[in-house]
Image (cartoon, coloured by chain):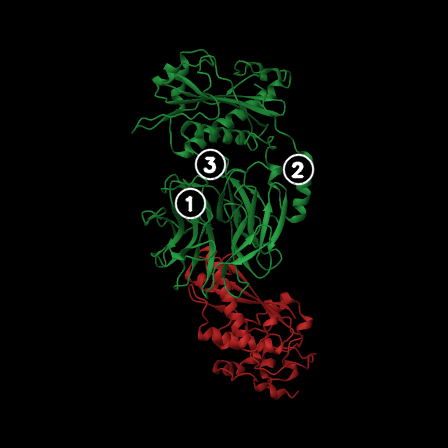
């Protein structure tokens, strides 16, 4: 496989947000110089979650688990030859906990009493889909969550609807539905225990948990 | 009269229950209870026998069928309940023909500690009986400080109706308590003061240490026979709590007054939305213990649990009044719909079919209609449908978010409670009356109030509220008065009020 072939997504045109994100992709937290074992990685847009550094995402610092020994400057100095084998994480060497902690897949936020995907959230899911397409062995659990203002019972169904909306969109983006399971936690496990608008916004979410690699 | 049937100590069965309970992730509540009474008395955990009528009382009026009828329009009925007197075994208040005094325990050196235990049991039973009767809210409780006056003029234990009438008592309930072997024995008589009649007399037997259980039983009997009132003293409330761990919720039980909070599940997973079987002996609930939320049944007194519906995701089970069906929500066909499953797992029927959310089914008391929540018009609202899914009707029209319907079990009131939100304000508990088509609000904006559940008599409502910080379980009267907070540890949600446990068949 030629590395630069990965510049061209096969299924659909890259959204503008993703193209912009490509430019920053080498802030990637866990650059691994060892060759990726999976040469059968399908082509797809390479937009790691950290690509949104410019938007102030907090995960942009290099992970201490990086085995490259490169400083951040050195990493940034590497020309963005997207698709080179060194871009791929050796996910086999990482635990699921570590992979999830590194935040490769980003949460999706929802409006109050809504399971609709807003354009920014679709962009986030496109990044998630791109990451998933690069690691086809990864399986995920899509968790639907709600803020505490709704009722327990309805929120269980609403969380389910949110998880389903995310799964369906990822499927439309080419992620095999067999790789995804959905679950609703309603408002039972809030990410943020606060009782204010900030907490509610964080808690109205779908979380993508890597459950197999 | 025969001696009362004594409770059977079913220890082997209890041991088996504990063993299977642990294996299944259940903590059998049977282990925390007094032993069951023998079957046939309808007494649950307390043995009951009628006392013979005192010589002065009219014969035939102390059977279980006699109901006191005090009708003084406009005036509250005043009830006096002196504390239980301690009775030495031989000094028990026994009527003619009773052989009970023969089964005694000699007062020996152990007598003093035994006397202490008896005094403590009497104090507990007195307090519990008082609060149980008071909770019903149908009698004016005569303060105990007046009782000395009524008792002053007469020798210990002797009843002078005129004295009680002079302090304004309409009904007098007096009891004695003693320890007899492994049992607490209480003898209770109820008197219509002005009629000067002993209208009720029963002997109650429970395990030592089960003074609360004993008093609850007595309270329900007193309320039934004094005013044909269905008490709730022996009912329990199931709920979901995070008190055992931050990333888990377990199903717990408690008595209606908040005492005896004890786990039903102990699997460290997420266990939510319990629903009682009508016989009060089992719960259905949702557990994530195997990953996806599945529908489980917990048979409390056998210490047995089983998964009823495990495919896809299941939510919000509701056990039918006839005990044969569980209504619940599942996404097995791609979206949240209401289904029925037979309790034996034999059948699965789908009742709703649309792209909207359908959740939180609740049965009407006759089992023919199911209320539920649907956002088919864009926001969650309450609907009803026949149990075959036909005859859809919308119930709630006010509010931007209505959920958690609970149908009153009352025969007098055809009404449904639910949590209702106006715009984005917190939830309040409201009740919709089907006959008047009026909706009344029971809570008023203190915190968010959710998940109403009716007491079996339809006169009280349990609900969860975060008015004191974390979610806690409260009860109130159906008019919103007499608010009581039952839980304080951790966060406690989705209370479900159950019937007293029926005797095993």
Asked if residue B242 can be seen in this view, the reply is no
Q: Position of residue A114 (x, y in %)?
A: 43, 66
What residue is at 54 percent from the left and 74 percent from the top? A170
From the viewer's side, name the closer residue of B71 and B288: B71
Seen at 63% across and 76% down, the residue is A135
Disc 1: which residue: B408
Do the dots labelled 1 and 2 sit on one chain?
yes
Residue under pointer 2: B14
Q: Is residue B236 visible?
A: yes
| Element type where label 3 sits in the image | loop
Compare residues B497 and B367 and report the one nearer the observer. Answer: B367
Quadrant of the rendering where the N terminus of chain B is positioned: top right
Instruction: Judge whether A188 appears above or below B495 on screen.
Output: below
**Do the residues bearing badges 1 and 2 touch, measured as CB atoms within 8 Å?**
no
Same chain for marks 3 and 1? Answer: yes
In the figure, the red chain has which letter?
A
Judged left or right of residue B296, residue B197 is left
């Amino acid at each position: 496989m030629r590395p630069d072939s990965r510049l061209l997504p096969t299924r659909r045109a890259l959204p503008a947000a993703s193209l912009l994100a490509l430019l920053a992709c080498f802030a990637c937290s866990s650059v691994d110089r060892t060759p990726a074992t999976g040469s059968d990685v399908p082509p797809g847009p390479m937009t790691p979650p950290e690509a949104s550094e410019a938007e102030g995402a907090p995960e942009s610092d290099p992970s201490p688990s990086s085995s490259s020994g490169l400083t951040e400057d050195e990493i940034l100095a590497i020309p963005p030859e997207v698709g080179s084998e060194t871009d791929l994480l050796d996910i086999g060497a990482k635990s699921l906990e570590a992979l999830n902690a590194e935040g490769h897949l980003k949460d999706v936020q929802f409006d109050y009493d809504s399971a609709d995907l807003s354009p920014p959230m679709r962009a986030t899911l496109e990044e998630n889909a791109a990451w998933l397409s690069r690691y086809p062995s990864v399986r995920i659990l899509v968790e639907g969550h709600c803020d505490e203002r709704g009722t327990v019972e309805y929120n269980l169904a609403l969380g389910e609807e949110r998880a389903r909306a995310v799964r369906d969109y990822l499927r439309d983006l080419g992620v095999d539905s067999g790789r995804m399971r959905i679950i609703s936690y309603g408002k039972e496990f809030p990410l943020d225990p606060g009782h204010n608008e900030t907490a509610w916004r964080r808690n109205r979410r779908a979380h993508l948990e890597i459950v197999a690699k | 009269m025969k001696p009362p049937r004594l409770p059977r100590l079913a220890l082997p069965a209890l041991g088996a229950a504990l063993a299977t309970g642990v294996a299944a992730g259940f903590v059998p509540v049977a282990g925390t209870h007094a032993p069951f009474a023998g079957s046939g008395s309808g007494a649950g955990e307390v043995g009951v026998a009628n006392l013979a009528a005192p010589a002065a009382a009219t014969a035939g009026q102390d059977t279980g069928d006699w109901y006191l009828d005090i009708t003084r329009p406009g005036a509250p009925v005043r009830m006096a309940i002196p504390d239980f007197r301690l009775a030495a075994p031989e000094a028990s208040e026994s009527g003619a023909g009773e052989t009970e005094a023969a089964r005694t325990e000699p007062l020996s050196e152990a007598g003093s500690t035994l006397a202490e235990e008896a005094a403590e049991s009497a104090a507990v039973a007195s307090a519990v009986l008082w609060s149980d009767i008071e909770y019903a809210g149908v009698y004016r409780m005569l303060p105990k400080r007046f009782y000395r006056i009524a008792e002053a003029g007469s020798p210990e234990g002797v009843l002078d109706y005129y004295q009680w009438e002079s302090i304004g008592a309409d009904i007098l309930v007096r009891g004695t308590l003693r320890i007899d072997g492994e049992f607490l024995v209480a003898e209770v008589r109820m008197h219509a003061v002005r009629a000067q009649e002993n209208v009720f007399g029963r002997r109650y037997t429970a395990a030592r240490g089960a003074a609360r259980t004993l008093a609850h039983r007595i309270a329900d009997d007193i309320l039934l026979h004094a005013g044909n009132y269905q008490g709730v003293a022996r009912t329990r409330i199931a709920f979901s709590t995070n008190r055992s761990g931050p990333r888990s919720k377990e199903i717990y039980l408690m008595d209606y007054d908040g005492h005896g909070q004890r786990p039903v599940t102990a699997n460290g997973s997420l266990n939510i939305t319990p629903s009682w079987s009508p016989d009060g002996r089992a719960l259905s609930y949702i557990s994530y213990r195997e990953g996806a939320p599945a529908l489980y049944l917990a048979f409390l007194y056998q210490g047995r649990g089983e998964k009823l519906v495990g495919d896809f995701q299941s939510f919000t089970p509701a056990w039918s009044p006839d005990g044969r069906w569980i209504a619940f929500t599942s996404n097995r066909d791609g979206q949240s719909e209401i289904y029925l499953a037979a309790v034996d797992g034999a059948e699965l029927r789908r009742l709703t079919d649309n792209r909207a959310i359908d959740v939180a089914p609740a049965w009407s008391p006759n089992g023919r209609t199911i209320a539920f929540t649907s956002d088919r018009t864009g926001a969650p609202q309450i609907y009803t449908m026949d149990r075959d899914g036909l005859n859809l009707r919308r119930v709630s029209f006010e509010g931007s978010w209505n959920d958690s319907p609970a149908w009153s079990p009352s025969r007098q009131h055809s009404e449904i409670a639910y949590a209702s939100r106006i715009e984005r304000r917190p939830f309040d508990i409201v009740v919709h009356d089907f006959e008047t088509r009026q909706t009344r609000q029971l809570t008023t904006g203190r915190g968010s109030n959710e998940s109403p559940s009716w007491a079996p008599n339809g006169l009280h409502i349990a609900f969860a509220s975060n008015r004191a910080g974390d979610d806690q379980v409260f009860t109130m009267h159906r008019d919103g008065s007499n608010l009581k907070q039952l839980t304080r540890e951790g966060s406690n949600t989705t209370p479900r009020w159950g019937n007293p446990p029926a005797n095993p068949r």
